[in-house]
């Protein structure tokens, strides 16, 4: 297949979910899609070795999407060929008591990727303008000065939080973190089918929660919150990509391709050169090793 056109999935300040696709198959069978992903992720894995050796950039991959959008399986399949020491995955669930005793970005700062490494956030700091936007009562657990009731949480509060997130990401970018944010755009009907499969298959029962159905009833509100969050926080240094998520195999190809094609544009990412002194003595080093026979 032809290379993925990265800009096709890049969002802008006027992002509308209804204008974005939820399904893609590139006219390929499941077998062909699986083979294509294998090729792309192998190349991405090899490039990760170079990034690790180069040691000057860290890569932050942020994954957001409605329940059942396929975040877990995407992480497993896209990063399968990575050196395990070069990638770290963090899943952010309901904040703990310790986390709530700090500002909402604190727990994300703690696990940012080091130079040369990939960090994958499965759900991200954007939960603080998505789930809490849909359920503003959760904000009260953060014990923020001046916020006493839900009525104190107005549009000015959310605009300030968007600014804080933008400042957070700008700071990371200016210090060598390459940021990629993916919104896995799942259709409501596909989510229904995936929830039904969880109920039908015993080995998937553990994934189901009645809470999924409660959140599903708030679908339209979540879509509105995603649109605003993405529109107000997509930037050249921290772009959002809206990726069709109804076909998991194609979704993985798109995410892997965007990462690979975008990273390859950084021409300064190269494996470090050996010093002239070492190069001049390579034959000598080889002789020493050969003599041990």
Image (cartoon, rainbow, N blue to C red):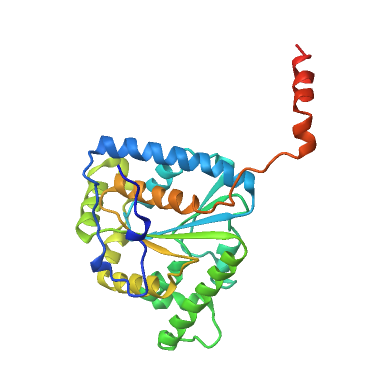
| Left or right of 7 in this view: 83 | right
Residue 205, horizontal then vertical, whole percent? 30, 46
- Residue in the picture at 41% in, 77% down: 137
- Residue in the picture at 53% in, 88% down: 146
- Residue 72: in sight, yes or no? no
Quadrant where the N terminus sits is top left
Picture layout, residue 255 above or below residue 234: above
- Residue 227: in sight, yes or no? yes
Instruction: Name the one closer to the observer, 272 or 191.
Output: 272
Instruction: Name the one closer to the observer, 203 or 80.
Output: 80
Picture layout, residue 154 above or below residue 236: below
| Total numbered labels | 0
Instruction: Name the one closer to the observer, 279 or 290.
Output: 279
Place residue 227 in its image quadrant: bottom left
Residue 96, horizontal then vertical, whole percent? 53, 64
| Left or right of 44 in this view: 212 | left
Residue 234, horizontal then vertical, whole percent? 43, 70
Identify the residue at the far top of this view. Answer: 293
Residue 37, horizontal then vertical, whole percent? 36, 40
Quadrant where the C terminus sits is top right
Place residue 217 in its image quadrant: bottom left
| Left or right of 126 in this view: 245 | left
- Residue in the picture at 39% in, 37% down: 39
């Amino acid at each position: 297949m032809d290379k993925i056109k990265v800009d096709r999935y890049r969002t802008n300040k006027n992002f509308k979910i209804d204008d974005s696709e939820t399904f893609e198959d590139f006219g390929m069978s499941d077998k062909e899609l699986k083979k294509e992903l294998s090729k792309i992720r192998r190349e991405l894995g090899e490039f990760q070795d170079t990034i690790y050796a180069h040691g000057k950039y860290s890569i932050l991959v942020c994954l957001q999407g409605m329940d059942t959008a396929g975040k877990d399986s995407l992480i497993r399949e896209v990063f399968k060929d990575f050196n395990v020491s070069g990638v770290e995955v963090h899943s952010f669930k309901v904040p703990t008591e310790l986390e709530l005793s700090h500002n909402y970005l604190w727990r994300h700062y703690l696990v940012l990727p080091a130079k040369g490494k990939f960090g994958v956030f499965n759900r991200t700091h954007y939960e603080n303008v998505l789930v809490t936007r849909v359920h503003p009562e959760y904000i009260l657990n953060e014990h923020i000065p001046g916020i006493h009731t839900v009525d104190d949480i107005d549009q000015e509060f959310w605009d300030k939080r968007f600014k804080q997130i933008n400042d957070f990401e700008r700071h990371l970018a200016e210090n060598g973190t390459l940021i990629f944010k993916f919104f896995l755009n799942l259709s409501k009907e596909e989510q229904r089918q995936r929830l039904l499969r969880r109920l039908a298959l015993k080995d998937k029962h553990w994934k189901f929660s009645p809470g999924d159905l409660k959140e599903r009833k708030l679908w339209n509100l979540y879509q509105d919150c995603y649109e605003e969050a993405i529109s107000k926080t997509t930037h050249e240094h921290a772009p959002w990509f809206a990726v069709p998520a109804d076909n998991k195999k194609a979704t993985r190809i798109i995410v892997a391709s965007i990462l690979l094609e975008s990273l390859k544009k950084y021409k300064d990412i190269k494996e470090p050169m050996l010093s002239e002194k070492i190069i001049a003595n390579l034959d000598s080093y080889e002789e020493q090793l050969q003599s041990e026979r």
